[in-house]
Image (tube, rainbow, N blue to C red):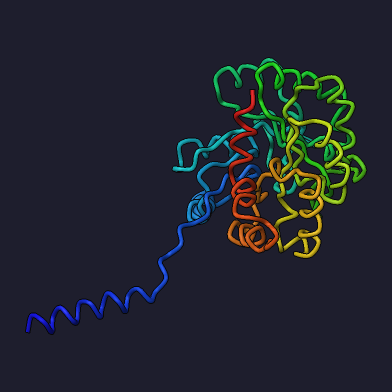
Amino acid sequence: MRKILLLLLLLSFGFLSFFPKSKSPQRVFDVHLHGDKNISAQLTALEKAGVYKAAISTSWDLQNSYRGKSKINFLFGLMFPCPNGKVPYSLQPCYQDGQEWPPISWVEKQIKERKINFLGEVLSQYYGIAASDSLLLPYYALADKYSLPVGIHTGGAGPNHGSPNFKLELGNPSHLEKLLSKLPGLKIWIMHSGDQYYKEAISIMKHNKQVYADISVLSNPDIVASDRFATIMKTFLAEGLDDRLMFGTDNGDVQRVIAAVEGLTFLSKEQKDNIFYLNAERFFALR
């Protein structure tokens, strides 16, 4: 009887070995996230996908609702300037008093109290001004003073954003040249990698080692075709910039966006890890 039991045990272990072990989720740092009406559902989806850290920016009130709500380590940004005082698309007030621009003294106070970890999403394009406009310089100077990263919207926009002064040409990263000539050490990440202006983003990055880019929107298969995404990524890689590209969802379906990156068969495991989290860890730690 003992021999029969032993044989059955061995057979059962052998049978179970045919089943592959469940794969742990990819470690992910989402550098481009916004608020959601259903915070609980959003957090559940992010955690399930392996997101352990995220940089979030949205209206000040909604953003504060994320503090202490999740095991995800959130970095909090400051969204401005707000067209007509509202967040594009959701059209909720950016600030309680309906302001388009937060007062500089208040911004510095939030930085000192560690309530702000970065400036962004900078909505200059939606507001109708260039990213290097003089109105933005006092804010950039604060970021430079406190070694805070600055995330600037580039590229295009979807429909119904509610920003009447939006101008497509202001989404060209070449506008950053003037800014970087004044603040050459400013830590910038080019949101959406410039999108249709990705070659201009590459040019800026090649000449400014502290400038990174996130691949949000480009990596969203619901917005950008997979072949176009692959072409853009290959161009960045050909210029040796795979160590400065960062993962972001911009509130797209996190599982589908991760799958889009995983589907780039020309990326090595090391390059994927860099994009998913290592580059972002390095960027946000820069001093």
Give the left or right position of residue 164, taking residue 264 as reference: right
Residue 260 at what x, y percent from top left? Answer: 66, 61
In this rendering, the answer to whether 191 lies above or below 227 is: above
Quarter of the image with the C terminus in it? top right
Residue at 65% over, 33% down: 283
Q: Nearer the viewer, residue 275 or 252?
A: 275
Residue 23 at what x, y percent from top left? Answer: 46, 62
Q: Nearer the viewer, residue 54 or 233?
A: 233
Residue at 90% over, 43% down: 167
Residue 68 position by quadrant: top left
Q: Residue furthest front?
A: 3
In this rendering, the answer to whether 176 lies above or below 126 is: above
Q: Disc count in the image?
A: 0
Q: Residue furthest right?
A: 169
Residue 247 at what x, y percent from top left? Answer: 65, 48
Give the left or right position of residue 218, taking residue 69 as reference: right
Residue 53 at what x, y percent from top left? Answer: 53, 41
Give the left or right position of residue 28, taking residue 226 as reference: left
Residue at 32% over, 79% down: 15
